[in-house]
Image (cartoon, rainbow, N blue to C red):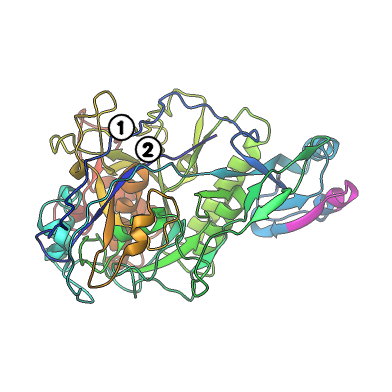
């Protein structure tokens, strides 16, 4: 199993149009650590640690049969969580022989051990510092520093600026859940935009040295704290970076970075910890919370993994994800996900990209090289008509030649004030009226929130439109890029926000 990749570097920016550099000046741009284009799927402890729980997916898609729970109990299992409405249970204490017996039951569709994996990439960071001025609470997105100076090419490419000019910035009543590493809700670009009352964490404790005895997945030998948080932080604070960057593409205060739908409400649903790790149970629980108690209209998941459906236990994990997402759609929540960054043909390969291939809309990435050809497929993006619905800006670089890359080819966004990775700790020095750091990043993780924000705009001005209707509008409101007609990289095309809100036919 491989995690979704993203590449990033960090830069501090001012609230005005001109960067006032510190005396040290900018550092050299980093070279990009390139993704492997031949991913290997695995659910072994080398890439994932057993959580000690087994996912049991019953054939009944709307209930957990009493006979099923009785069977689990008779095999020595203990049900730790049950989602009756989709026929899924999490069970502890099952031996290998018990798993075999359970799998053979005519009540059960699939059984598989849950895994704790890293769903996000390593980081590569360089910083540029700049002076700052006192920021106003809320700006017109067109006046955001990095949009105004041309750095945010992505917003113009998708016609977001045309939507802003027409007053289409979304409505506060539209709710977008960022199912990710959390959100730095105190970051100047994100403060006041996050609904703290419905934000929640489902991130697991970091597992250290989990053992397997006689083939039985055991609980970890030791545990370390989920996150190195400040005492005053909420559990859904972003101690990684990723979720805050993703969130600021959807909605921001438009101080330095412009967002697509600045007036919508964000919900932080933390399913990954400060290492970018989490379990399938945690991710699925986050989806259920977002669509249920949090009442999200849109879910963005810029996370994922490549799995082999022929591997033992994987069908149960995939079926669980599929049922959870379908249930969210039934509740009126559209689920937008990233395609993955393994340069993998999902039409021809054996591997499955999850949750991309279960989602309402899966998004591939585009981006320029040296600020030219902004609609070319990003070198890392997964592709294939069977999985991808649309493309969106995700940033780009040339994997064969590091000189064919510049920082501005990536996507800029907020960097969390609690970032833990040593290459990102500079973001902890963010200070109002002083230095503030933002990050340039590339990945389908960066492409997905563009579409989530577009979905939020569509919902804002078409509140009675169904999930199917929003999806249809996203697919039809595109620009044909690459090969004429539907193609394997962008399928229906690259999104166009101006078309989606009815400004262009």
Q: Is 337 in front, or is 242?
A: 242
Q: Residue at x 34, y 53 (%)?
A: 449
Q: Compare residues 220 and 297 and report the one nearer the observer.
A: 220
**Element type at mark 2:** loop
**Mark 2 lies on residue:** 388
Note whether residue 317 is visible: yes
Quick one: quadrant of the N terminus?
top right
Dot 1 corresponds to which residue?
Answer: 489
Side of 474 where 215 appears, left or right: right
Which residue sits furthest right?
Answer: 74
Residue extent of the magenta highlight: 70-80
Percent across and percent down for residue 178 are 42, 59
List x then y, in percent, for residue 239. 46, 59
Asked if disc 2 and disc 1 are in contact, CB closer than 8 Å, the reply is: yes
Write the residue at 46% across / 65% down.
237
How would you rate the neighbour count of disc 2 (Cα within 10 Å): few for under 14, some for 14-19, many for 20 or more?
Answer: many
Residue 78 drawn in magenta: yes
């Amino acid at each position: 199993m491989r995690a979704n990749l993203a590449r990033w570097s960090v830069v501090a920016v001012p609230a005005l149009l001109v960067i006032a550099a510190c005396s040290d000046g900018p550092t050299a741009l980093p070279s990009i650590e390139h993704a492997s284009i031949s991913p290997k799927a695995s659910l072994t402890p080398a890439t994932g640690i057993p959580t000690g729980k087994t996912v049991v997916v019953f054939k009944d898609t709307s209930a957990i049969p009493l006979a099923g729970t009785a069977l689990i109990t008779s095999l020595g299992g203990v049900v730790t969580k049950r989602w009756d409405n989709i026929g899924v249970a999490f069970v502890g204490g099952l031996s290998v022989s018990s798993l075999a017996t359970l799998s053979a039951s005519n009540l059960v569709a699939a059984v598989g051990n849950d895994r704790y994996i890293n769903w996000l990439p390593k980081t590569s960071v360089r910083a540029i510092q700049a002076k700052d001025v006192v920021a106003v609470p809320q700006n017109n997105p067109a006046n955001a520093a990095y949009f105004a100076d041309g750095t945010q090419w992505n917003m113009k490419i998708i016609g977001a600026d045309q939507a802003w000019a027409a007053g289409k910035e979304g409505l506060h009543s539209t709710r977008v859940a960022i199912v990710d590493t959390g959100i730095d809700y105190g970051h100047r670009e994100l403060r006041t935009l996050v609904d703290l009352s419905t934000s929640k964490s489902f991130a697991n404790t970091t597992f250290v040295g989990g053992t397997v005895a006689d083939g039985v997945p055991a609980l970890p030998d030791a545990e370390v704290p989920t996150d190195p948080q400040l005492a005053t932080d909420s559990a859904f604070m972003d101690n990684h970076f990723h979720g805050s960057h993703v969130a600021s593409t959807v909605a921001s205060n438009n101080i330095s970075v412009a967002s697509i739908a600045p007036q919508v409400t964000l919900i932080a649903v933390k399913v990954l910890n400060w290492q970018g790790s989490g379990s399938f149970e945690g991710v699925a629980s986050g989806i259920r919370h977002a669509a249920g108690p949090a009442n999200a209209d849109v879910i963005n998941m810029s996370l994922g993994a490549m799995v082999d459906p022929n591997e033992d236990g994987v069908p149960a994990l995939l079926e669980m994800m599929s049922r959870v997402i379908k249930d969210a759609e039934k509740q009126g929540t559209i689920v937008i996900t990233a395609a993955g960054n393994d340069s993998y043909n999902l039409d021809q390969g054996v591997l499955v990209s999850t949750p991309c291939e279960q989602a309402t809309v899966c998004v591939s990435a585009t981006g320029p090289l040296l600020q030219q050809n902004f609609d070319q497929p990003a070198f890392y993006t997964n592709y294939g008509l069977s999985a991808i619905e649309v493309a969106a800006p995700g940033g780009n670089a040339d994997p064969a030649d590091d000189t064919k890359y510049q920082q501005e080819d990536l996507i800029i966004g907020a960097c969390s004030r609690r970032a833990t990775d040593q290459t990102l700790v500079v973001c902890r020095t963010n200070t109002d009226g002083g230095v503030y750091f933002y990050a340039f990043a590339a990945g389908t993780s960066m492409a997905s929130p563009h579409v989530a924000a577009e979905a939020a705009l569509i919902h804002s001005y078409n509140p009675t439109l169904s999930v199917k209707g929003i999806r249809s509008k996203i697919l039809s409101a595109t620009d044909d890029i690459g090969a004429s007609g539907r193609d394997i990289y962008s399928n229906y095309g690259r999104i166009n926000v101006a078309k989606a809100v009815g400004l262009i036919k």
